[in-house]
Image (cartoon, rainbow, N blue to C red):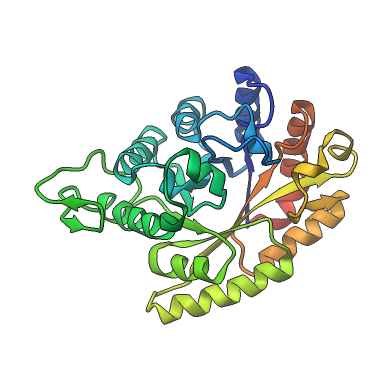
Amino acid sequence: MKLGVCLPHYGRPIEVPRMLEVARRAEERGLDSVWVTDHVIVPTQTNVIYREHMLDPLAVLPWLAGVTHRIALGTSVVILPYRSPIPIAKLLASVDVLSGGRLIVGAAIGWLEGEFDALDVPFKERVSRSEEALELFQTLWTQEHPTLETKRHRLHDVTFSPMPLQKPRPPLYVGGNSEKALRRVARFGDGWHATATTVEAFGQGAETMRRFWKDAGREGEPALSLRIPILIDGVHRAAVDMSLIRGRHVIGGPVAKIVEELRGYQALGCQHIALEVSYSTYPAILETIDIIAERLRPPVAG
């Protein structure tokens, strides 16, 4: 199983040198991935860590491509209805080229209704807009001269460039924990990107996902991945505003307990976990990266 961290590009004063230190420490210590997170304009009354000091993830990704060399770059997740899908397809393909083929695309429909209102995107259209975007991504990343008609887009006699470096295209993981989200994975994705769920719930979702995958006539097995906060005893808890995590499952406690829980996800087929470290201080984040590299990754690697 692979382990990565979510870059702290939100929820704290923007300090580019310290973010750079986090990204490079993750790469130097042999972690598998670094991930960015998507929100655009968050309602003031919503108590989430993404509300303030949030750099745009689609600006951060090309920067990451230039300041790292080996580590995979993931989106956890791009909220598809927020933006026009064809320019996003081009941007993501460009990041794959600039990074030497290191991009992982996680995508989802979104949940924060007030943010949709601020962006003048109908909340009730988020499913149709997202599925249209996923169809466009699949087509544009595999056909240089695409021909496709969707509800909102008609592609004829056009050329798409650049084509992604990865073939047939970058991996496309669809987020969400609902049954409808799992059906969406089976229709449009290469795998499932779950969010902050327990081992038991992850196992139930994975079982349902595999059933939908077969029902859709898909070959092979879906990739399974997870994004979840991590709070290590003696490293995080004194510095964390727990109200920002309320209602979300957290991998936490002493290192031995965390290893046991990671192995639980691994036994269910989880192949990649993005660990959220943004709820704490920069020194704690760097210490967490060291602990992941030295004590968490070795027991689940392979």
Q: Is residue 138 visible?
A: yes
Residue drawn at 81 percent across, 38 percent down:
241
Residue 242 placement: quadrant: top right
Q: Could you tell me residue 20's position as x and y percent?
A: 60, 24
Q: Nearer the viewer, residue 206 or 12?
A: 12
Q: Could you tell me residue 294's position as x and y percent?
A: 76, 42
Residue 239 placement: quadrant: top right
Q: Nearer the viewer, residue 213 or 268?
A: 213
Above or below residue 53? Residue 83 is below
Total numbered circles:
0
Residue drawn at 43 percent across, 43 percent down:
82
Above or below residue 150? Residue 16 is above
Q: Could you tell me residue 288's position as x and y percent?
A: 76, 38
Residue drawn at 50 percent across, 30 percent down:
60
Question: Considering the image in quadrants, where does the N terminus appear?
Answer: bottom right
Q: Is residue 74 visible?
A: no
Q: Would you say 197 lies left or right of 93 here?
A: right
Residue drawn at 73 percent across, 54 percent down:
248
Looking at the image, which residue sits at the far left? 157
Q: Could you tell me residue 277's position as x and y percent?
A: 71, 39
Above or below residue 16? Residue 257 is below
